[in-house]
Amino acid sequence: MRSFFWFRALLFTFILASFGCSQTPKQAVSTGGVKLVPTLLNDLPGWDNDTIQDALIPFRRSCKKILKTSSSKPMGGKLYSGLVKNWHLACQALPVLNANGGEVRRYLNKEFKAYKIIDNENPTGLFTGYFEPILKGSRTKTKNFVIPIYPRPKDLVLVSLGDWRQSLKGERIAGKLSGPRLKPYFSRNKIRKGALNKTTKPILWLESDIDAFFLHIQGSGRIDLLDGPTVRLGYAGHNGHNYFPIGRYLKDIGAIKDKDMSLQNIKYWLRQNPTKKDFVMDKNPSYIFFREVNGAGPIGAQGVALTPGRSLAVDRRFIPLGTFVWLKAKYLDENGQNLQRLMVAQDTGGAIKGMIRGDVFWGSGATALKLAGPMKAQGELFLIIPKSIEVKGAL
């Protein structure tokens, strides 16, 4: 999963004009550079071609979380998505498990309305992909398995800023206590050089520091243990340092051209430059800690198993986890068709910042890597919320 939380001061706030009708409005809601353009569900790009019933798999998982949440709480997000009680009603009205596409479309048309998101006159944003790697590992350190995968250190303090200020909901910082003060935690460079050696026992060991680096980027993985069964690792915390994409650095120095930028090519460059790889990987000071998890898939930031091709990592400052979105991206999906489908916001990511920004979870292993690695597509995003919600200002 990509449950990376990074502290950043909010650069702006905005308020969406409110109106009282629970039906799809005739005019766009626009203020502060943000525009929500009402769109009939039947007019969503690819509406008739999507195997839309597949999106109910992740939504049912999200509903289990939503139905356990107090109905009076706000769903959160700057793009107002109502109170939890609005989503309780939508979850309770879910079609039967084996519902076909027609039944699901009727349910959505009855319960939901859609808005196209436009940010500062820009209707598109960047959409990338991620996956769950499958790696070899060992419970014990050996001659070949020397790269530690750490659990969350006991002295790591994570602070949810939303507990103090609603406008900072979804923002977190991390550090370690030094007397009464919270100070920055060890960077990737310091951890690589042994800062945790005496205090934190690794969960397991990997062969490759490059594989470990990208395990951090993906946020989850399956490890085939030489001395045990396969285990699944999920996100347990981070060191609080901002994520920096090393691909940007490699592009800036002319190592990889922008048109050739992909996860696969970054890995290849690192392996071909063993004397430079540590310096380059340390450009990204953020470091992820893991835990062993059980479940049907990697666990996202909402706390539910992710669904290949249907779970989307978003910036939760704007889009609440557990809500429907519709994605139209200039990218070919697993069937070689244009990527236009109903998805559920279930995860977050260190690089996923902005209103029209997302990361598509493509699944596990080599096939998922082929879809996720090269994905760097422009796309449009539609917010889909229950009709019972009156679009209001930012929370």
Image: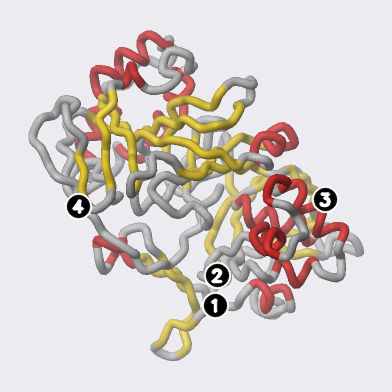
Gap between marks 4 and 3, in whole Å? Answer: 55 Å
Relative horizontal placement of residue 219, taking residue 301 as reference (left or right) = right
Number of marks present in the image shown: 4
Amino acid found under the numbered disc labelled 1: Tyr
Residues at badges 2 and 1 in contact (C-beta under 8 Å)? yes
Gap between marks 2 and 3, in whole Å? Answer: 29 Å
Percent x, y of residue 298: 57, 42
Instruction: Return the residue at label 3.
Output: 227
Amino acid found under the numbered disc labelled 2: Asn
Circle 4 residues within 10 Å: few <14, some 14–19, many ≥20: some
Q: Earlier in the sequence, mark 2 or mark 1?
A: 1
Residues at badges 4 and 1 in contact (C-beta under 8 Å)? no
Q: Is residue 282 visible?
A: yes
Residue at screen point 19% across, 26% down:
24
Residues at badges 4 and 2 in contact (C-beta under 8 Å)? no
Percent x, y of residue 368: 67, 35
Q: Is residue 395 visible?
A: no
Percent x, y of residue 47: 41, 18
Instruction: State the residue in front, 375 or 223.
Output: 375
Circle 3 residues within 10 Å: few <14, some 14–19, many ≥20: few
Instruction: Return the residue at label 1.
Output: 185
Instruction: Return the residue at label 4.
Output: 15
Q: Residue furthest bottom?
A: 179
Q: Earlier in the sequence, mark 2 or mark 3?
A: 3
Percent x, y of residue 146: 82, 65
Instruction: State the residue in front, 336 or 216.
Output: 336
> Picture quarter containing residue 18?
top left
SS type, badge 4: loop
Q: Report the mark closest to the observer, 4 or 2.
A: 4
Q: Report the mark closest to the observer, 4 or 3.
A: 4
